[in-house]
Image: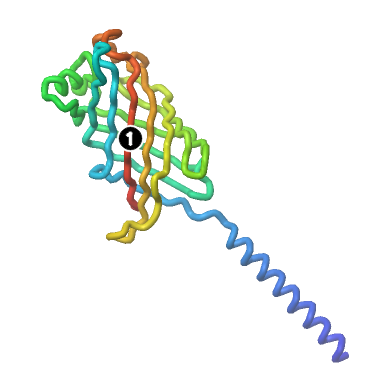
Amino acid sequence: MIRTVSRKRKRALMFKIIRNSVLVLALATLPARAETFDLDSTHTSIMYSLNHLGFSTSRGIFREAQGRLVLDETSPEAGRLEVVVKTASVDAFDVGRSNSVKGDKFLDVEHFPEMRFVSTKIERTGSTTAKVTGDLSLHGITRPVTLDVVLVKKGKHPITGAQRGGFSATGLVKRSDFQILGFLPMVGDDVTITIDAEFGAS
């Protein structure tokens, strides 16, 4: 009788150990909770460049933007990015040219004060690279745009200790796709977008 009870207890103990081991393993392999980050506009540049009459490359920068990034390092494809840019914040590094870009031949900021990018697909292409496709709404028109994105660094901010992510991205937009037709074809149709951005944990 004593031997029988001992065997039962031994089986129960072994079952408990196995069950707890399986539970610990399952918890250890669960994906990390998705993190939400807000765009730090003071450490972000959203720049464009296009051909100017065949003589030079004309450049500009948008100085006001807001955005939010949802990121899960274990499943980057499930992430989401949304950025809103104030079109009137464009700076073409010359007052006259800036006013021209804001005018009705180009951005027409009076009627279209914002442009918005909302991701629809994130495709990981390497350990620190991805293609982010989304809908760009600009000049009253929405078209798909793909950005080539590089994760520069993710980790704790050395001063605040909060989680932070830095990214660079490039993409190409045809302004004629958005009915921005000023001075075509003398001024280039292809507009290169170059972005350097930091996101801080919400």
**Three-letter residue code for mark 1:** Ile
Scheme of colours in the image: rainbow
**Left or right of residue 195, residue 126 in this image:** right
Farthest residue to the left: give it: 95
On the image, the x and y values in percent for residue 68 come to 35, 43
For disc 1, the neighbor class at 10 Å (few under 14, some 14 to 19, many from 20) is some
Residue at 24 percent of width and 18 percent of height: 56
Q: Which quadrant holds the N terminus?
A: bottom right
**Left or right of residue 170, residue 72 in this image:** right
**Left or right of residue 194, residue 30 in this image:** right
**Left or right of residue 42, residue 136 in this image:** right
On the image, the x and y values in percent for residue 28 come to 58, 62
- Label 1 element class: strand
In which quadrant of the rendered view does residue 180 lie?
A: top left
Q: How many marks?
A: 1
In which quadrant of the rendered view does residue 42 lie?
A: top left
Eyeballing the image, is 65 above or below 1? above
Residue at 25 percent of width and 42 percent of height: 41
Residue at 48 percent of width and 49 percent of height: 72
The residue pinned by badge 1 equals 195
Eyeballing the image, is 49 above or below 79? above
Residue at 37 percent of width and 48 percent of height: 165
On the image, the x and y values in percent for residue 197 come to 32, 41
Eyeballing the image, is 2 above or below 142? below
Farthest residue to the front: give it: 55
Front in this rendered view, residue 6 or 171: 171
